[in-house]
Amino acid sequence: MNNTQGSTEKKILILGGTGKTGSRVAHRLTQRNWPIRIGSRSGEPAFDWLDQATWELALQDIHTVYITFQPDLAVPGAVDSIRSFAETAVKNGTQKLVLLSGRGEEEAEECEQAVMNSGAEWTILRASWFCQNFSEGYLLDPILGGYMALPVRNIGEPFIDVDDIADVAVTVLAEAGHTNQLYELTGPRLLTFEEAIREIATTTGQSIQYEQISGEAYVAALTEYGVPNEYITLLTYLFTEVMDGRNATVANGVEQVLDRKPTDFAEFIHKTVASGIWATR
């Protein structure tokens, strides 16, 4: 497929274009010579979820939007923001919306419905927990510190490599055949958080202690570290409510789109070790 032909009239806006998935999607599309616009507060023009006055300019001449919402679709106000943005996008001529969603979150499913009901062509990418939360997110410092305490029961999660999400996103953004489809994106096997930490420790040769703690103890620890209340509420909700077993299944969305197996957690570990991110300082 020659993605340069006609692509000038199909510019893609990547919301969260500097984030975990957005930056990877932007890089891959740029390699394909696909015209893109990065949607972020530092972008040109700027895009800010909290300032609707920035939306229309960012949407000018945009055919397709890759939608990611920070910090999570479960936060208060996310559903209204997604609904309003989708309406604004359609009003401004955008024809296709691709939403990165989360598994097992009622609020995320409401956001999905808002996109589905917008009048635009849509594709939903409903993803499990990111492997990269252990290497690029809030779980990195505990790994480097050798101690991780979470209020998570012994529940399996099919952690997905963000590079797989980006590969799927680029395919559905740039190629035909994925209109009005919902893909559940997971890794190939279930791991508890304790098992994931054990695999990281074994491969890296580092001593990393894992402890299951109460929700109250977790809130107290985050508060002590100065984490903002809205993030404490979100993380506690995700760990104690969403991680109740409802997502302890493996889905085949990656295979459906890419015709290959998703990246195994062990492969993610080896890739991250090679990057040096987990090297103790």
Image (cartoon, rainbow, N blue to C red):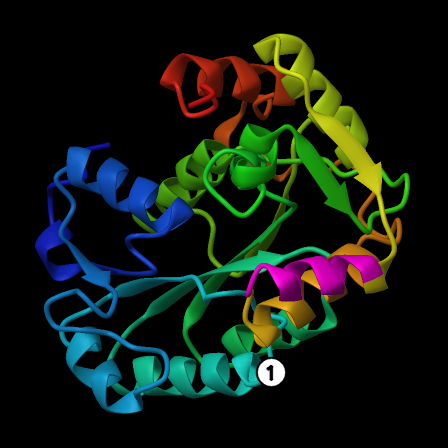
Work out whether residue 44 or residue 218 is closer to the camera in this orientation and state it. Answer: 218
Left or right: residue 79 versus residue 149 is: left
Q: Is residue 228 left or right of residue 207?
A: left
Q: Which residue is mark 1?
A: 76
* Residue drawn 64% across the image and 19% down it: 200
Q: Could you tell me residue 189's position as x and y percent? A: 75, 26
Is residue 191 something one can see in this rendering?
Answer: no
Q: Is residue 222 magenta-colored?
A: yes
Residue occupying the point 42% across, 25% down:
277
Magenta residues, start to end: 217-226
Q: Amino acid at mark 1?
A: Pro
- Identified at 51% across, 74% down, the residue is 115
Q: Secondary structure at mark 1?
A: loop
Q: Tag 1: Cα neighbours inside 10 Å, few (<14), some, or many (≥20)?
A: few
Q: Which residue ends up furthest to the bottom in the rendered image?
A: 53
Answer yes or no: is residue 237 visible: yes
The picture places residue 210, in percent across and down from the top left corner, at 77, 32
Q: Quadrant of residue 45?
A: bottom left
